Amino acid sequence: MAECIHGFDEGMCDICFPRTAPEPAVTVAASATRTATRAPRTAATRPASRRPAGTAAGVPAKVPPFGTRRLYHATPLVNLESILLDGELRPIAGGLEPDLDVAAPLVRQLRAHADVGDGRHVDEFVPFSASPDAERWVELRSGAEEPHWSAAARALGAADYAVLVAVGRDLGPDLVVADADAAAPRTRFTVGDPARGVAVAARTDPELTAVEVLVPGPVPLTAITLVAVANEPARARVRRMFADVEGVPPKVVVHPPWFVAAE
């Protein structure tokens, strides 16, 4: 299959293959000779929007099955090389010592003590987001000014990161879904049923920008299907990293929309 200049398969890139909006339906004026035999429908009785039968209010009409859903893990490029050498993504509690830690020390403490509901703690998992515009990732690529980021994070720009992409079915069944920041005291967790956890979270967060999907570590590198970067120099750098890794590497693509800072 052909691919675009950014590395995506044909039709998958929003830049090279922009989606076109459907043409509006043509409205035909009613005949002047038609006799009104019933009261006209008032604005109060007309539904504001339509959704498929059986879809709960507040839930997107088309939610992909969890098994086919893309999940995202952002990491500094300087840490990616260590991930490749290890051949896996490790959780902090599993012995990970990142070359550059973007989380503030207090956040690390909170995640080490946050119980997901079955005795395990958040730092025993590798975190993925359910949206390429997740709140925490947007904060990082916009300067990391919030207090839960480290000084090292504030020294980085968006182009200093890579986004590792996996598909839900490749991460195993023992996943935990947090409906918000996994270290926050009021966050609710769904253990072992990620499809249900995402569906519940979507009722109040339709875009899933606050959701964390926690994967028991380590996560093998073979579960990563795509690595996205901000520009061509970063792609060349990542491809050089993969040159020393055994096996078939994931596709490395340039996708600037995922690295744009919030206005």
Image (tube, helix red, strand yellow):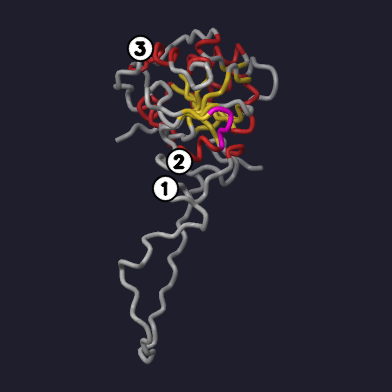
Could you tell which of marks 2 and 3 lies nearer the N-terminus?
Answer: 3
The foreground one among 142 and 107 is: 107
Q: Which mark is residue 106?
A: 3
| Residue in the image at 60% along x and 12% along y | 85
- Dot 3 amino acid type: Leu
* Category of crowding for the residue at label 1, using alpha-carbon neighbours closer than 10 angstroms: few (below 14), some (14–19), many (at least 20): few
Residue drawn 37% across and 19% down?
156
Q: Residue 42: x and y, percent? A: 31, 72
Bounds of the magenta segment: 191-195
Task: Please name whichever residue, 42 or 248, is drawn nearer the observer in this view of the structure.
Answer: 42
Q: Where is residue 78 in the image (x, y as percent from the top left)?
A: 48, 14
Q: Position of residue 186 (x, y in %)?
A: 37, 26
Q: Is mark 1 on a helix, strand or loop?
A: loop
Q: How far apart, in angstroms, are the residues tagged by discs 3 and 1?
A: 34 Å
**Residue carrying label 1:** 58
Would you place residue 199 above or below residue 109 in this image? below
- Asked which secondary structure carries label 2, the reply is helix
What residue type is disc 2 on?
Ala
Give the amino acid at mark 1: Gly
Q: In this figure, which residue is indicated by the disc labeled 2?
A: 202
Instruction: Write down the quadrant of residue 146 in the picture.
Output: top left
Q: Nearer the viewer, residue 126 or 198?
A: 198
